[in-house]
Every structure is written in C-alpha cells, then in structure tokens.
Image (spheres, helix red, strand yellow):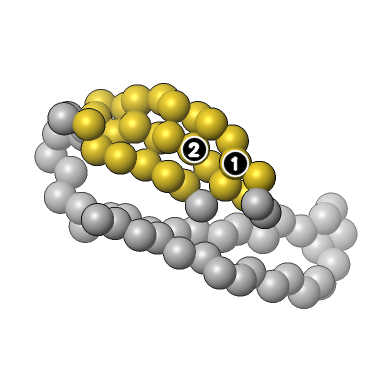
Amino acid sequence: MWNVERVRNQVNYVSLTISDQTYNIDTYDPNQPGWTLEEIDVAFQMEGNYKHEPYNVCLDQVQLTAN
C-alpha cells in the first residue's frame, strides 16, 4: 500500500508497505499540468515464461484510496 500526501503543488510518496514491511520512500514529484484525474487506475500484469505455459494467480486486497 502506498502512503502519499499532497504538499502544495507536489505529491510526496511517503512510504510503501508490502506484507507488513514498510519502506520509506520520501520522494516528491511535481503536479502534472492539465491532468483532470480522469485516468487513475490500478493495474496488475501477469508475465508468462518463455513457453507461455498456463498458470493460476490470486490477487487479493488491492485498493486505491484518495482523500
């Protein structure tokens, strides 16, 4: 889970938590002029092996939260 905050005209990526382990990021990115919040999404991409053999995967508890 990403922990982010808005600071004036920037986004502060505070930390990332994966499986109860939190990693401090603390990096700032400027806003994107003209962005209308219409293209926010969460994506998951599965990659196959060189033989393209079938396999199963479970993706659980994915969330995108905005305040």
Q: Which residue is mark 2?
A: 15
Q: Residues within 10 Å of mark 1 (few under 14, many from 20)?
A: few
Left or right for 39, reference 64: left
> What residue type is disc 1 on?
Thr
Residue beneath the point at 66% across and 45% down: 21
Q: Are marks 1 and 2 in contact (CB under 8 Å)?
A: yes
Q: Measured from the top left, where is residue 14 in percent x and y?
A: 43, 35
Classify residue 31 by image quadrant.
top left
Q: How many marks on residues?
A: 2
Classify residue 27 by image quadrant.
top left
What secondary structure is found at the residue carrying circle 1? strand
Q: Measured from the top left, where is residue 34 in percent x and y?
A: 13, 39
Q: Measured from the top left, where is residue 59 in percent x and y?
A: 63, 69
Left or right for 17, reference 15: right
Residue beneath the point at 71% across and 56% down: 47
Classify residue 5 by image quadrant.
top left
> What residue type is disc 2 on?
Ser
Residue 22, labelled with which disc? 1
**Distance from the alpha carbon under mark 1 to that under mark 2:** 7 Å
